[in-house]
Structures are given as structure tokens and as C-alpha cells.
Image (tube, rainbow, N blue to C red):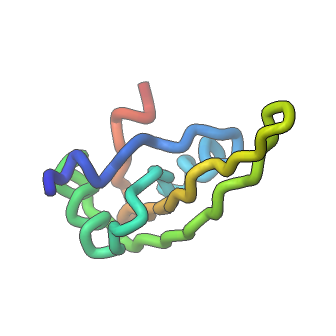
Amino acid sequence: MDMHDLLLKPVITEKTTMMMSDGKYTFKVPLHANKIEIRKAVEKVFNVKVKSVTTLRTMGKMKRMGKYIGKRPDYKKAIVTLQEGETIEFFEA
């Protein structure tokens, strides 16, 4: 699997934007990705040093569309903490 495939998309919310000032960046990752793979992917793709990786698995919500009931897919988020003085330029622009 390619390193770019591990980082599906960044999570941009008000909370994650405030966390960026502390050097914490949030990404949506595949359910099968582990912390070591995520660390290597972020270090290779963005050329930064990672201090720690925290992952959390979020279960999809049940949703209704009229009389039909469906479920949103489950997903995994990774909160990546960078070493002091490191930033990801992608988010700063």
C-alpha cells in the first residue's frame, strides 16, 4: 500500500483548527491502519518528525431517509502530534 493511501483526508473543524496551534493535526485514515504505519506515512509525505500518534475509531450513525433506514460507514481518525518547531505547510496556506 502506498503512503499516500493511508492519509485519506484531513479533518478540518473548529476544534482541530485550534489543535493545530499545539502541533496536533487530524487525519481520516483507513480502519486497518495502525499507529506505526500512520507515523511513517506522515513523516514521508510531509517531511516532518512525529512525536506521537493517537487513533480513535468512530462508529457510523444510523440515518433515516423517509421510510428507509441506513447507516453511515465507520471510520478511524488519527491525531498526529509533531515535534517542537515542526509544522505542516499544507494546513498553513
Q: Quadrant of residue 42?
A: bottom left
Q: Residue at x 78, y 39 (%)?
A: 68
Q: Residue at x 62, y 63 (%)?
A: 58
Q: Is residue 22 left or right of residue 36?
A: right
Q: Residue at x 42, y 64 (%)?
A: 31
Indicate whether 60 appears above or below 33: above
Q: Quadrant of residue 51?
A: bottom left
The quarter in which the N terminus is drawn is bottom left
Q: Is residue 45 left or right of residue 68?
A: left
Indicate whether 19 appears above or below 66: below
Q: Is residue 64 left or right of residue 79?
A: right
Residue 82 position within the rendered picture, expressed as x and y whole percent measured from the top left: 39, 61
Q: Is residue 81 left or right of residue 43?
A: right
Q: In the image shown, does 44 or 89 lie closer to the viewer? A: 44
Indicate whether 62 appears above or below 49: above
The quarter in which the C terminus is drawn is top left
Residue 45 position within the rendered picture, expressed as x and y whole percent measured from the top left: 20, 47
Residue 18 position within the rendered picture, expressed as x and y whole percent measured from the top left: 65, 46
Q: Residue at x 85, y 31 (%)?
A: 66
Q: In the image shown, does 9 or 25 lie closer to the viewer? A: 9
